[in-house]
Amino acid sequence: MANRDQVNERYYGQINSEESHEATRSRIHWICRHVQGHTVLDAGCSQGITSILLGREGFEVTAIDLEEGSISYAKKELRQESAPVRGRVHFQLKDISQFERPPGGFDTIILGEILEHYAHPHTLLAHAYRLLHKKGALVLSVPYGYHPFHDHKRTYYAGSLSGVLFPYVDEQALEVHHKYLCFAGRKKAKELCEAKPGAEHLARWMELDEEQFRLVEEQHVRKMNQRKAALDKAVQRIRYMEERALPAERTPRPEQAGKRQDEGKGSYTDGGSTGKKTGNVADGKGDGVKS
């Protein structure tokens, strides 16, 4: 099943909410600000917005993706750019594992919302490490915490993401933007597959996670209070309407009152269970009474 990412439409505010539009722009601009050097590999480029933005700024960008529909869309978008931008950005339908390292490697590799799709992220990171320049930069983003998407195989928090990246890159920046973790780091001189972060790193990541959990809880409490206030208001409205309706129900309508009065006029029963009218008691000639 194709993921059918629509990042370009979200970036330009053509679909989804204003919040989604702002979150997408914020995340992509953060990635662009942390790109270093001149040559860039945008792995998992989707519809190509990040690559095109970097091409406008003079970077030489190679952009790859596994989905043919995304690459076709990106190429169509690129055709609308100026000739210099078209000459600097190159979209290819290719897997990173099949990609040959250019002479010297790439100055920056971008992994925008890619890592969470891997059950074994070290497979991807080993290839990124292989393709990077010896002092190259790795810039990436992942959803922060649980995100209910069918193809997300891992959930990342500050500590878990940084722990996965620790053997390959030295952290330079780690921030949360609109429920996304954004990371930038520089390639380690040597891949350290067995390396583990120290207490200082762990404490910093725990502090970031703790702050984000606090913000999430505060937001949750605000939403619960808003829902409670709305529910209380609805209950009060229902009670008000019920109180107005009750007096009308207790007061009989004119036609009902007249019917009841007619039923009680001019006759009485003999007290029997049948409730039939008696005849003229004085002469004994009523209905059902023999002379």
Image (cartoon, rainbow, N blue to C red):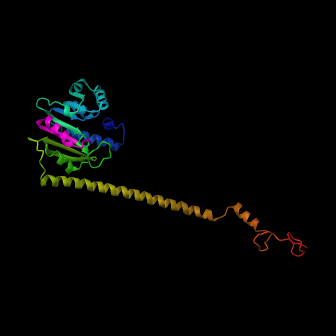
Instruction: List the single residue furthest toward the bottom.
Output: 282
Can residue 59 be spotted in the picture? no
Quadrant hosting residue 118: top left
Of all residues shown, which one is farthest toward the left? 189
Is residue 224 at least partly visible in the picture?
yes
Q: Is residue 34 above or below residue 90?
A: below
Residue 110 x/y as whole percent: 20, 37
The x and y percentages for residue 112 are: 24, 39
Along the viewing direction, whichever of 255 and 131 lies nearer the viewer: 131
Residue 128 in the image: state x and y as whole percent: 17, 37
Highlighted magenta segment, given as a residue range = 117-140
Query: Where is residue 43 shown, x and y percent of the image?
Result: 22, 35
Question: Where on the picture, by quarter, is residue 15?
Answer: top left
Residue at (20% x, 30% y) in the render:
62
In the visual, does 253 lie left or right of 272?
A: left
Q: Is residue 37 above or below residue 254?
A: above
Between residues 201 and 255, which one lies in front from this camera angle? 201
